[in-house]
Amino acid sequence: MTIAGLWRAATGNKPPTFTMLTTDPGPDVAPYHNRQVVVLQPHEWVAWLSLTKPEAELLRPLPIGSLAVETVRPEKS
């Protein structure tokens, strides 16, 4: 899984900086959260790195069924 992000090299006394980009949740995430990280599919990796597609085509939620959701820690009753 590849997450869209931005990175800036260290300059002067400032350390390198990075962030993961988020978007509205897709149908797999919406029942649990109001945002999701932007997951890039393999055919989108080169377009993201080489800036050959508009951001709007890449910074979007995944289609239904793209993510498997499972409970990691059950809620306390």
Image: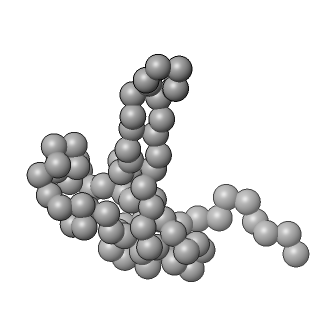
Left or right, residue 59 beside residue 57: right
Q: How many marks?
A: 0
Q: Where is the C terminus found, in terms of image quarters?
A: bottom right
What is the x, y in percent for residue 39?
Answer: 37, 57
Residue at screen point 45% across, 50% down: 20
Given residues 70 and 18, the one toward you in this image is 18
Left or right, residue 77 beside residue 62: right
Any part of residue 65 in sight: no
Colour setup of the view: one colour
Given residues 75 and 62, the one toward you in this image is 62
What is the x, y in percent for residue 22?
Answer: 45, 61
What is the x, y in percent for residue 67?
Answer: 43, 65
In the rendered image, the residue lying farthest to the left is: 52
Given residues 14 and 33, the one toward you in this image is 14
Residue at screen point 73% across, 60% down: 73
Any part of residue 8 in sight: yes
Left or right, residue 49 beside residue 74: left
In the rendered image, the residue lying farthest to the front is: 12
In the rendered image, the residue lying farthest to the top is: 12
Residue at screen point 37% across, 76% down: 64
Vertical relation: 26 (above or below) 12:
below
Q: Quadrant of residue 58?
A: bottom left
